[in-house]
Amino acid sequence: MSLALTASHVRKSYNGRPVLEDVSMSFDRHGVYVMTGTNGSGKSTFLRISALIDDADSGEIVFSSEEGILKHDIRLKRRITLVLPQIGIFNTTVFKNAAYGMNIRGVPGAETAKKVEEVLAFVGLAHKKDQNALTVSSGERQRLGIARALVIEPEILFLDEPTASIDEKNSGIVEDIIMKLKAGGKTTVIMTTHDKDQAGRLADTWLIMHEGRLIPHS
């Protein structure tokens, strides 16, 4: 694995209420890590801290590769990405939404077009590429969010409740996307879900957030 994540003694409180009390875990191999736990247990908080969106009160989030320990700079942040349950969509085509990450990186048009076509096919939205993204279903919107993340080829993909509030058909498609990522062996997926059956289907490593700590599922 080229990029590994280690959380050490991560703590986080909101308004004096501890959410994460002492989270330590290594994510050091390809595959799918799934976190389950009750509402408010801290799963999403831990995901946001791990994705370098929020800061922990204490503890460390360490990314490392063959180069050693990596700085939390823009180069690292371009190797990871987080997809939230409510995807922000631009008022333009599905294609242009998926191309966003390439465009802000200044990737040439021909290269962007090729990559976007590939990821839209990967998530089953190639036939929607010219449709306004605001008109697609909630399940298709979620898949578009994943496509927009995958176009930059992240080494670690964080997914927060990727099938929340979408129908069974689209949930199945999202699960298939995750399984294809696992089979591809290039992207590590770290995700949360409330669905224990889904966790059982997808997880190489199943973790439970309980009382502010992350423990292996037995």
Image (cartoon, rainbow, N blue to C red):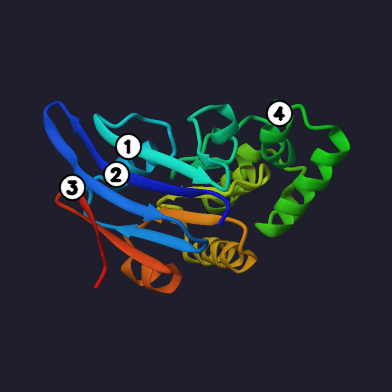
The residue labelled by disc 1 is 60
The residue labelled by disc 4 is 105
Horizontal arrangement in the rendering, residue 125 relative to residue 58 (left or right):
right
Instruction: Using the image, tell me which numbered label, if any, was put on residue 8.
Output: 2
Q: Residue visible at 48% across and 50% down?
A: 4
Q: Which of marks 2 and 3 is nearer the N terminus?
A: 2
Label 2 – label 4 distance at C-alpha: 32 Å
Label 4 crowding class (10 Å Cα cut-off): few <14, some 14-19, many 20+?
A: few
Q: Earlier in the sequence, mark 4 or mark 3?
A: 4
Q: Earlier in the sequence, mark 1 or mark 3?
A: 1
Instruction: Using the image, tell me which numbered label, if any, was put on residue 126.
Output: none
Horizontal arrangement in the rendering, residue 135 relative to residue 112 (left or right):
left
Along the viewing direction, whichever of 86 and 201 lies nearer the viewer: 201
Q: Which of marks 4 and 1 is nearer the N terminus?
A: 1
Which type of secondary structure does the marked residue at label 1 adopt? strand
Q: Which of marks 2 and 1 is nearer the N terminus?
A: 2
Label 2 – label 3 distance at C-alpha: 13 Å
Q: Residue visible at 71% across and 28% down?
A: 105
Label 4 – label 1 distance at C-alpha: 28 Å
Identify the residue at the far left of this view: 16
Label 2 – label 1 distance at C-alpha: 5 Å
| CB under 8 Å between discs 2 and 1 | yes
Instruction: Using the image, tell me which numbered label, if any, was put on residue 212.
Output: 3
Which type of secondary structure does the marked residue at label 2 adopt? strand
Residue 182, relative to residue 149: is it above or below? below
Quadrant of the snapshot with the N terminus: bottom right
